[in-house]
Image (cartoon, rainbow, N blue to C red):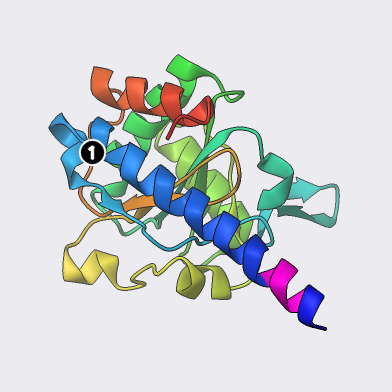
Amino acid sequence: MKFLKTVLIGAFALVFGAASGKAEGIKDYLVGDLEALTVKSEPVRVTAMEIEGSYKGTEKNIQSLGAKEGRALVITFYSRGCTACRAHLRSLEALQRNLGTDVVEVIALHVGAGGIHEAERILARWGLEGLAAYEPHHQSILRDLGMDPDFQRTGTGPMTVIVGPDGVVRATSYRLREWEAPETVTFFKALARGEV
């Protein structure tokens, strides 16, 4: 029992130590628009979280975020009534197109009424063919990532969560808009290489 306890404590220290080191490293990249990022000092892992994509025939397409490990993720939230979301998603689409989905993938989660079919309609109406339609499989993902469900009414703008290729959240933002800026591209390249 004592051995098991020692192993568990050691494993926690390794994870927390690695996360702390990454949190320190990220600060070197917080220039320009990236200064709007809020760095996460405690590890939040997204690998067990599930999302739903477009239907496969008549079956729900449930995916684990853990299947996307190995690349940086940008998780964001939107709904039809969010006036800031269209430009926000367009900028994220440009980032993904510039770097490729093997480096960074945008996970835009629809949180409004109408389900995945409404998500598909909104993205098509907004001309965002480069983004896949997703929605949370469980609403707990909103709580686990600390998303404000009233972001449309409070005026904070859509929340964005930046996840490293190891599935651990690095930072969040309610304000960053220029995702295709040169300093942001540099940051995501470093993140994908595991340097942040």
Mark 1 element type: loop
**Number of residues whose C-alpha sits closer than 10 Å to that of mark 1, classed few (under 14), some (14–19) or many (20 or more):** many
- Please, what is the dominant secondary structure of the magenta stretch? helix
Quadrant hosting residue 102: top right
Quadrant hosting residue 185: top left
- The image position of residue 56, as x and y in percent, is 82, 46
- Magenta region includes residue 117: no
Residue at 25%, 32% (x, y): give it.
28
Q: Is residue 100 above or below residue 113?
A: above
Residue at 16%, 63% (x, y): give it.
155
Q: In front: 9, or 99?
A: 9
- The image position of residue 48, as x and y in percent, is 69, 61
Residue at 30%, 31% (x, y): give it.
179
Task: Give the magenta-colored segment's residue range.
Answer: 4-8
Q: Is residue 153 above or below residue 120?
A: below
Q: Is residue 162 above or below residue 62?
A: above
- Name the outermost residue toward the front: 2
Quadrant hosting residue 159: bottom left
Residue at 57%, 45% (x, y): give it.
120
- The image position of residue 109, as x and y in percent, is 51, 54
- The image position of residue 93, as x and y in percent, is 42, 29
Residue 129 shows in the view:
no
Q: In front: 105, or 10?
A: 10
Residue 95 located left or right of residue 134? left
- Magenta region includes residue 7: yes
Q: In front: 53, or 34?
A: 34
Task: Give the residue type at disc 1.
Answer: Arg
Residue on which disc 1 sits? 177
The N terminus - image quarter: bottom right
